[in-house]
Image (cartoon, rainbow, N blue to C red):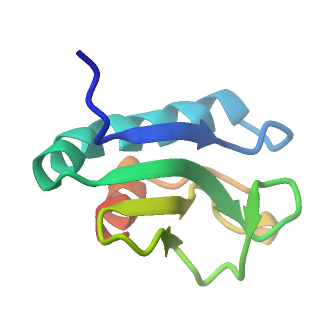
């Protein structure tokens, strides 16, 4: 039986370098958070890549590591956005998993 307390969808920037590795990083963060989501009875409708450029599903200044858009019911996040890459001016290289996962847990 599949739990309803999970991340429902994952979306990353397919047009940026290392897109397969970015998807893997986002999936790994999702899988790592699932036990916590089940234990707290939380759900996330959408987990997305956050970037400073227009290629990503969500854009924000390079200083923002992530954000959460709550649904207002104290258990659901409509959207969690995580920065997976360094800014474009620094080559869009992927961040370390620990940095991404720490942001996921914070959000």
Q: Which quarter of the figure has residue 1?
A: top left
Please state if 23 lies on the left or on the right of 102 as rendered.
right
Residue at the (30%, 63%) spot, across then down: 75
Q: Residue furthest top?
A: 1
Residue at the (72%, 68%) spot, across then down: 87
Say whether residue 99 is visible.
no
Which x, y percent locates residue 72? Answer: 43, 75
Q: Nearer the viewer, residue 86 or 3?
A: 3
Residue at the (51%, 55%) spot, across then down: 95
Q: Nearer the viewer, residue 96 or 14?
A: 14
Q: Is residue 78 above or below residue 6?
A: below
Please state if 35 lies on the left or on the right of 89 as rendered.
left
Say whether residue 66 is visible.
yes
Q: Residue furthest front?
A: 73
Please state if 93 lies on the left or on the right of 40 as rendered.
right
Which x, y percent locates residue 10? Answer: 57, 39
Residue at the (86%, 54%) spot, across then down: 55
* Circle count: 0
Q: Which quarter of the figure has residue 107?
A: bottom left
Q: Nearer the viewer, residue 89 or 74?
A: 74
Which x, y percent locates residue 97? Answer: 39, 48
Which x, y percent locates residue 44? Answer: 43, 51
Q: Which quarter of the figure has residue 104?
A: bottom left
Q: Nearer the viewer, residue 81 or 15?
A: 81
Please state if 1 lies on the left or on the right of 102 as rendered.
left
């Amino acid at each position: 039986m599949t739990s309803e307390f999970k991340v429902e969808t994952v979306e990353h920037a397919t047009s940026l370098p290392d897109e397969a590795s970015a998807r893997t990083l986002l999936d790994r963060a999702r899988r790592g958070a699932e036990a916590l989501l089940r234990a707290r009875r939380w759900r996330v409708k959408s987990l997305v890549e956050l970037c400073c450029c227009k290629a990503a599903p969500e854009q924000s200044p390079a200083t923002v590591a992530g954000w959460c858009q709550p649904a207002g019911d104290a258990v659901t996040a409509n959207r969690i956005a995580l920065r997976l890459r360094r800014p474009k001016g620094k080559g869009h290289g992927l961040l370390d998993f620990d940095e991404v996962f720490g942001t996921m847990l914070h959000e």
